[in-house]
Structure formats: structure tokens, C-alpha cells
Image (tube, rainbow, N blue to C red):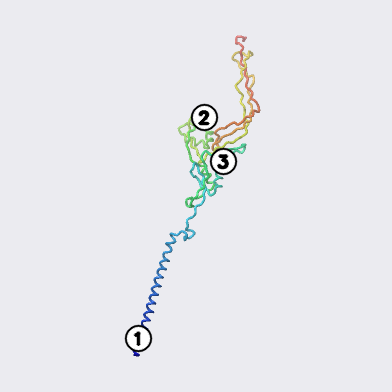
Amino acid sequence: MEELEITMNEVQHIKKNKVIVITFLLIMLLTTVIGCQSDSKSNSEPDNLAVEPDRLPTESKIVDKIDVFAIEINCKPVVYLETELEAQMVLDELFIQYSMPEALNSDYSFKEEVDIIKYKMDTFDVEQFQTSEKALAYIREGSDQQIVYEVKLGDYLLRIAELYGISVFDIEDENPELDLKTFTVGTKLNITVSVPLISVYATHRIQRLDPLQFGVDEVVKTDEYFVGEYKVKQDGVAGEAQNLVDIHFQNGRVIGETVVSTVVLKEPVNKVIYQGTKPLSSKK
């Protein structure tokens, strides 16, 4: 019986050891599985970062849209500036360049439809903000345009060249077939001029002293002189008037003027001529 009891005790001890071993193996297996899942999750995190913007590093995030100010000409943006003040300064400078210090008052306007418009843009859509100086130069430079100028009475090459801000050589180069030393009224000249992107109209009101031309010669008939004889009895003398004048310019070039009011300071004196009526037969 004692031997049987020993044998049974050993069996029970072996069973207990088996349970411990199996339990230990199960724990190891579970630990391995959890570790694999943890590694898998760790390895997948970079992919999650690529699709979750909130977890991106600061330098990799998409930059917010920013305000830019465009000068638009006829609804088309031509230059971009960083602030509205800079854009307005460019437009103001276009007026200032055609100012007339002696004017009593001045009015300015643009030929084109010009606006300052605020845009929301990504920084990579704006290659570079233009400075007010570069924007102004770009607008002033504009583009070349060819015109045909018809010569008028009193024209000469230098005057025509100065009228369009070019040189006499420029006119000669564009009209090689013409003899510009002997051109006449009505001659048509090809001229290339620089046309700014924005044309400025300016009207300056000034006070000006202008001569008043005397009228038609007065002819007084007299028998003091023979038929066919004329004698100047009195020379004509111009008068003087103080005029209030609006002078109209386009891009600095005079295109007309309007006399607003006139105050005559000195009346003109007409020229008086004596016309002889004495018969020639009375000559001795």
C-alpha cells in the first residue's frame, strides 16, 4: 500500500508540473502575440502621419492663404503688391508725374478701368511680390505701338519727335523711303511710340495772360490820295486778356484746352488804312 501511495503522489506531482509548463507556454505565446501586434502598430504609424495633416510636422503643413492686392486694368490683374497702401501709392504716383505746380487746381482720371482688388492666394501661387517702384516702372513701360502721323502746317522733325518722346533718328529709321528734309503738309510718317498700360488724363486750370488780336483792317476812303494808293493811318495794336484756362493732357501731352473765363485788360486797336479816291486825271 505504501508503494502505491508513493506512486500516486508522483503522478499527481507530474500532473501539477505539466499544468505549470502548459501555463508558462501559454503566457509566452500570449506575450509574443502582443509584441507582434505592438510592432505592427509601430510600423504603421508613418503611413498614418502621411494622411493625417494634424500630425504633420509644422514645416510640412500647407500654408494658409494670404491676402494680396492686385492692380487690375479692365478687370485683368497686372501687378501684385503686399499691401493695399503700396498699390494705392503706385496709382497716386501715376498722377503725380503729370502734376503742374502752377495750376490753380487739377483733376486726374484714368482712360482705362483701374481698380485695387484683394485676393486670397497661396504663397506658391504668387512668385514674388512686386515693390511699388517695380510695379510703377512696369506700368509706365507698357508696350510699343505703331501709329501713322500726318504732318501739319508748322511741323518739323524735332517738334514731332519731342511730341512723342522719341528722337529724330527714330523717325528717320522708320521712314527710310521718305526724304524727311523736304516733307510737306500731309506727309504720313510711321512712328513707334511706347504706350503705358495705364493712360492718365489730366486737366490743369491756370490763369494766363493772352494777347487779343486786333480785328479786320479798317479802310477809310479819302480823296487825299489817288486811286490805287493806300496809306497806313494807324498801326494795329494787340490787346491783352487774363484768361482762366483748362488745359487737357493725355500722358503729359497737350490734347486741347478750354477757356473758362476772360477778363479784357487792354482792348486791341485795329489797323486803319487810307484808300485813295482822287481821280488819276487830276494829276499834273
Tell me: residue 98, above or below residue 19: above
Q: Position of residue 101 (x, y in %)?
A: 61, 38
Q: Position of residue 103 (x, y in %)?
A: 61, 37
Label 2 vs 1, first from the N-terminus: 1
Q: Residues within 10 Å of mark 2 (few under 14, many from 20)?
A: few
Please state, as top left, top right, bottom left or bottom right, where the C terminus lies in the image. top right
**Identity, as a three-letter code, of the amino acid under mark 3:** Phe
Q: Quadrant of residue 233?
A: top right
Q: Which residue is mark 3?
A: 95
Q: Which residue is mark 1?
A: 8
Q: Secondary structure at mark 1?
A: helix
Q: Depth-wise, is mark 2 or mark 3 nearer the camera?
A: 3
- In this view, the residue farthest toward the front is 1
Label 1 vs 3, first from the N-terminus: 1
**Identity, as a three-letter code, of the amino acid under mark 2:** Lys
Q: Secondary structure at mark 3?
A: helix
Q: Quadrant of residue 97?
A: top right
Q: Depth-wise, is mark 1 or mark 3 nearer the camera?
A: 1
Q: Left or right of 185: which side holds 221?
A: right
Label 2 vs 3, first from the N-terminus: 3
- State the mark number for residue 152: 2
Q: Residues within 10 Å of mark 3 (few under 14, many from 20)?
A: some
Q: Are marks 1 and 3 in contact (CB under 8 Å)?
A: no
Please state, as top left, top right, bottom left or bottom right, where the N terminus lies in the image. bottom left
**Identity, as a three-letter code, of the amino acid under mark 1:** Met
* Mark 2 vs mark 1, CA separation in Å: 139 Å
Q: Residue at x 52, y 29 (%)?
A: 152
Q: Secondary structure at mark 2?
A: loop
Q: Are marks 2 and 3 in contact (CB under 8 Å)?
A: no
Residue placed most toward the observer, 24 or 93: 24
Residue placed most toward the observer, 153 or 242: 242
